[in-house]
Image (spheres, rainbow, N blue to C red):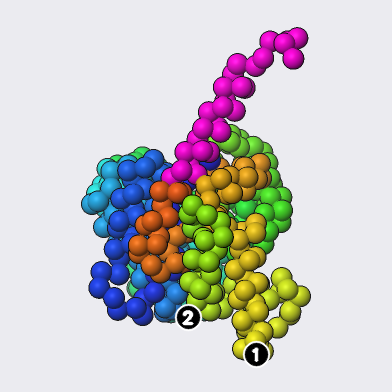
Amino acid sequence: MKFSLFYFDGDGLNTQANPYKLLIESAKFADENGFSAVWTPERHFHAFGGLYPNPAMTSAALAMVTHNVQLRAGSVVLPLHHPVRIAEDWAMVDNLSNGRAAIAFASGWTMDEFILSREPHGSRKSVMWRGIETVQKLWQQEAVDFEDATGRTVSTQTLPKPVQPKLPIWVTCQSMETFIEAGRLGLNVLTSLLGETLSQVEPKIARYRETLSKHGYDPHSRTVSMMMHTFLGADVDQVKEDIRQPFCEYLKTHYGLLENLAKGMGLNVSLSDFSDDDLDSLLLFGVEGFIKGRSLIGTPESCRTFVQQLSDAGVNEVACLIDFVQDFDAVMGSLPYLAQLKQHCDQDNDRAMHIEIHPAPIGTG
């Protein structure tokens, strides 16, 4: 199991000094402690995630302060950008980082953000799949034909030339259809448990691995990254107490997530139908619901079993979302415990490999 850090919740309305301090310092921690990657998102027009409108810019900044971790977009909303712009920007990131750029592509979410797109919201899936192919061609220095505003065809080859011969690509997946198409194309997968349980996502991962094999790819050579809300400490009860209020404030800003939680309680209503008492009950339910089976919230030891369950389900990387707690000292203080969990999992893997490579002799009991 690999571990990476994920950012999604930086408050764009908060005017505190140095709002990217947590991003920079925690990325340095990841870089120095054997984490596989750092993910930054693309978010528009909402305080929730408002610090992150452009993952190419954040990754370029992180290239200057890290040396080892892969710098990933989590995610680039491909229909909002021309493929040439994506290829050019991320080739710069690849050069600045000496070959550490990677992108998870998404088709997009809200209607409002499609003011940035030349394509309608309803076409976003097909635009994403076509765009992924085009970006990879440009990355590999192939010339691609595009039309300008007058209809004139322009053969285009982008610069600068990236360091990596192929761009590492993930696809942000929730539906079975997207998992299958990612497998058909041999791409990595980024997913989450925001709207589902692990038992509901596990069949999708299995189908993805089957599709990889069917289309000639080694099913174990691709990465399934699971985004998980993560906060660890020395004592489970203290951790729950520390994150309860920050998590409630976080849920208040994430309306879609709250409504999913309502459905999980059997309440088929919109957020506007909630009374204040209902909302308070839902928030408490939400915190407990995420702690049990949807997050890495606890201690290195208490979270170890769930990491094994993720591994058994076909997940081979945990993308640890850490900035839902908007407290620099608290989050930085939790990271050494996360490093301990990573170390425990590394040791478990080493023992498993040793047993597999050196089985006990027959008859030794």
For image coordinates 46% across by 43% down, the residue present is 340
Q: Which mark is residue 112?
A: 2
Pick the residue in front: 20 or 179.
Answer: 20
Q: Main secondary structure of the magenta part?
A: helix
User: What is the three-letter code of the residue carrying label 1?
Assistant: Ser
Q: Secondary structure at mark 2?
A: helix
Q: Which residues are magenta?
A: 339-365
Q: Which percent across, then down, holds residue 312? A: 66, 41
Pick the residue in front: 313 or 84.
Answer: 313
Sort mark 1 into few (<14), some (14-19) or many (20+) by Cα contacts within 10 Å: few
Res 248 → quadrant: bottom right
Question: Is residue 36 toward the left or the right of residue 285 in the image?
Answer: left
Contact, mark 1 vs mark 2 (Cβ under 8 Å): no
User: What is the three-letter code of the residue carrying label 2?
Assistant: Asp
Q: Earlier in the sequence, mark 1 or mark 2?
A: 2
Give the Cα separation between the discs numbered 1 and 2. 28 Å
For image coordinates 39% across by 74% down, the residue present is 11
Question: Is residue 19 toward the left or the right of residue 200 in the image?
Answer: left
Res 154 → quadrant: bottom left
Residue 140 visible in the current orientation: no
Q: How many marks?
A: 2
Res 265 → quadrant: bottom right
Q: Which percent across, then down, holds residue 282? A: 65, 77
**Where is mark 1, residue-wise?**
275
